[in-house]
């Protein structure tokens, strides 16, 4: 069966173009972008006539760059290099332009080289410029790109330029607004593609197909039938080598302002008038407009201490490299959101996310109300009946399940919970594609549905900035702790239990 997005994808044919990756020798390109591009190439999903130009400071040749990218694919791509002939066809698409981003002349040299390549490959000035560089460089590099004449339409060919900007997009409302203002000096909103890699995840896109491609769920997707919603994004990893960044960020900035709020929007939004970028963005923005300001009383934070992950001892957050030994940065947060609109009034949305938790799992669980009268006993002799829960598993074990009550065989009339399960890999015979594959193709096709629009990013910051300020600016010495490998601080359990609910055991 063809999904909405697949039919849209088939309809728009990407034109021959150039993808320029700024920061091409950096981690993001090596771990994510190049492996995604290679995978697309092997699966014949890379747009025909695409040229990939890497740019970074080091003065290496095209061949050296190709060698580095080959190593990255060997290390980070799920399928490795595979067939040598495939690799050599891919290597022919790769070029390298050295540039010192602080030096205006570099951009002029880049422009000359780019124009030459564009002429040779007839890409007619159609470019996607991908900023895989440190966030404080987004605005200055975008400015220099524009000053060098690479931002607007190509004078002779009418070719277009798109700018892809990675997260984090600002660090609070003011800095996000400032960055938007700076980018808009040279780029229209329609040229800017802000990345949130969660939106590229197949299972996140599937939320909309699941909700709006089936008639049976939508009538019960509201306050009349839904008791509450739980969204979890749990990780087993710690801060890895990013202690310095994470110290300034914390879980609210790192996971909630972007990924978790995107999941809330996909779950709570109204059906768009039609399936196109602006219509979808409008509905998502309306959800954020309807969210009540978050009170610090409806939020809990925590920080991991030493513990065990998969039977191996791991250090606490304060012992990680680049982290202050007295840090109060949160590595775990849980919130309760209220969406004040007709559909969701009175239905709490519980969100939690943390590092070094017991299991890696991201899911959205819709807990439906119980039947009005309970005729049956639970066979397990627990209090009352279970409620129906619909779980959309974003990762791993991507899929959907619906729990319901059944009577097991036997003379006794009692009920047990069972589930109907859809497992992505079993159904389709393969794991879903990596998020960056989808996002790269969409940017090349000019489809911004899965990117973040300016108003959304600012609204998301305006919701979270007051809580971030309350937590970070009034730094207290105390932050609840939790051992690595657990499910977070005990304060988070008490937080949800006072409403008569429990965090799902995953
Ligand atoms: C990133 C955060 O945006 O998302 C990381 O900066 C986090 O800290 C990552 O680990 C999680 O992404 P995923 O795809 O592994 O769930």
Image (tube, rainbow, N blue to C red):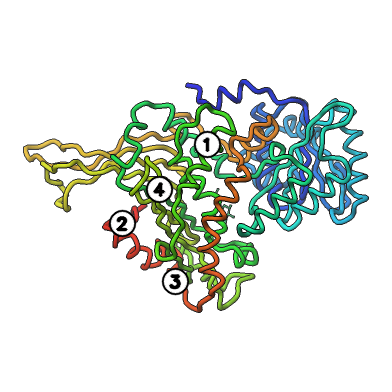
Mark sitting earlier along the chain (2/4):
4
Q: Is mark 4 within 8 Å of ligand 1?
A: no
Q: Is residue 55 above or below residue 7?
A: below
Q: Are marks 3 and 4 in contact (CB under 8 Å)?
A: no
Q: Secondary structure at mark 4?
A: loop
Number of the front mark, 1 or 2: 2
Q: Which residue is mark 3?
A: 481
The response on whether ligand 1 sits within 8 Å of label 3 is: no
CA–CA distance in space, label 1 to label 4 = 29 Å
3 and 2 marks in contact (CB < 8 Å): no
Could you say whether the residue bearing mark 1 is in a helix, strand or loop? Answer: helix
- Real-space Cα separation, disc 2 to disc 4, in angstroms: 23 Å
Q: Disc 1 or disc 4, which is closer to the eye? A: 4
Q: Is 479 on the left or on the right of 368, as rendered? A: right
Q: Position of residue 306 (x, y in %)?
A: 48, 71
Looking at the rendered image, the disc whose residue lies closer to the viewer, 2 or 4, is 4
Q: Between marks 1 and 2, how big is the CA–CA gap?
A: 28 Å
Q: Earlier in the sequence, mark 1 or mark 2?
A: 1
Element at label 2: loop
Question: Which residue shows up at 29% across the image and 62% down it?
Answer: 498
Q: Which residue is mark 1?
A: 202
433 or 314: nearer the eye? 433
Of badges 3 and 4, nearer the viewer stands: 4
Q: Is residue 27 left or right of residue 298?
A: right
Tell me where residue 52 appears, x and y as whole percent: 78, 37
The one of 272 and 357 positioned closer to us in this rendering: 272
Residue tagged by mark 2? 502
Q: Which residue is mark 4?
A: 340
Residue drawn at (52%, 36%) of the image? 202
> Earlier along the polypeptide chain: callout 3 or callout 2?
3
Q: Position of residue 298 (x, y in %)?
A: 40, 62
Nearest the viewer among 407 and 2 is 2
């Amino acid at each position: 069966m063809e999904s909405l997005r697949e039919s849209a994808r088939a309809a728009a044919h990407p034109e021959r173009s150039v993808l320029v990756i700024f920061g091409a020798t950096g981690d993001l390109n090596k771990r994510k972008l190049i492996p995604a591009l290679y995978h697309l190439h092997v699966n014949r999903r890379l747009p025909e006539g695409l040229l990939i130009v890497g740019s970074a400071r080091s003065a290496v040749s095209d061949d050296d760059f190709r060698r580095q990218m080959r190593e990255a694919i060997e290390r980070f791509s799920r399928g490795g290099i595979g067939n040598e002939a495939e690799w050599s066809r891919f290597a022919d698409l790769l070029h390298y332009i050295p540039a010192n981003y602080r030096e205006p002349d570099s951009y002029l040299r880049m422009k000359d080289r780019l124009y030459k390549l564009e002429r040779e490959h007839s890409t007619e000035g159609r470019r996607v410029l991908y900023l895989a560089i440190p966030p404080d460089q987004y605005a200055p590099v975008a400015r220099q790109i524009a000053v060098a004449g690479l931002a607007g339409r190509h004078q002779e060919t009418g070719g277009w330029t798109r700018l892809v900007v990675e997260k984090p997009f600002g660090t609070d409302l003011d800095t996000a607004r400032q960055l938007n203002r700076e980018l808009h000096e040279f780029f229209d909103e329609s040229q800017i593609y802000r990345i949130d890699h969660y939106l590229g995840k197949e299972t996140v896109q599937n939320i909309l197909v699941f909700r709006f491609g089936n008639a049976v769920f939508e009538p019960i997707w509201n306050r009349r039938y839904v008791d509450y919603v739980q969204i979890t994004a749990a990780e087993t990893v710690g801060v890895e080598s990013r202690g310095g960044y994470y110290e300034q960020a914390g879980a609210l900035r790192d996971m909630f302002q972007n990924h978790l709020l995107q999941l809330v929007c996909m779950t709570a939004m109204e059906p768009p008038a039609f399936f196109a970028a602006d219509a979808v963005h409008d509905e998502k923005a309306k959800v954020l407009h309807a969210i009540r300001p978050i009170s610090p009383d409806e939020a809990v934070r925590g920080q991991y201490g030493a513990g065990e992950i998969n039977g191996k001892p791991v250090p606490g957050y304060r012992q990680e490299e680049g982290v202050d030994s007295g840090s109060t940065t949160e590595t775990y947060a849980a919130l309760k959101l209220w969406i004040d609109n007709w559909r969701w009034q009175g239905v709490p949305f519980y969100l939690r996310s943390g590092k070094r938790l017991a299991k890696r799992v991201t899911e959205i669980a819709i807990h439906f109300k119980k039947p009005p009268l309970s005729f049956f006993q639970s066979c397990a002799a627990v209090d009352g009946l279970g409620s129906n829960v619909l779980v959309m598993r974003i990762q791993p074990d991507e899929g959907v399940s619906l729990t319901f009550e059944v009577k097991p065989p036997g003379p006794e009339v009692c009920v047990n919970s069972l589930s109907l399960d859809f497992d992505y890999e079993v159904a389709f015979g393969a794991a879903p594609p990596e998020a960056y594959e989808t996002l790269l193709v969409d940017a090349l096709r000019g489809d911004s549905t899965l990117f973040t629009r300016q108003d959304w990013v600012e609204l998301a910051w305006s919701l979270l900035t007051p809580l971030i300020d309350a937590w970070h600016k009034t730094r207290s010495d105390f932050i609840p702790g939790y051992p690595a490998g657990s499910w977070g601080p005990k304060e988070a359990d008490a937080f949800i239990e006072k409403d008569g609910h429990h965090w799902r055991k995953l």
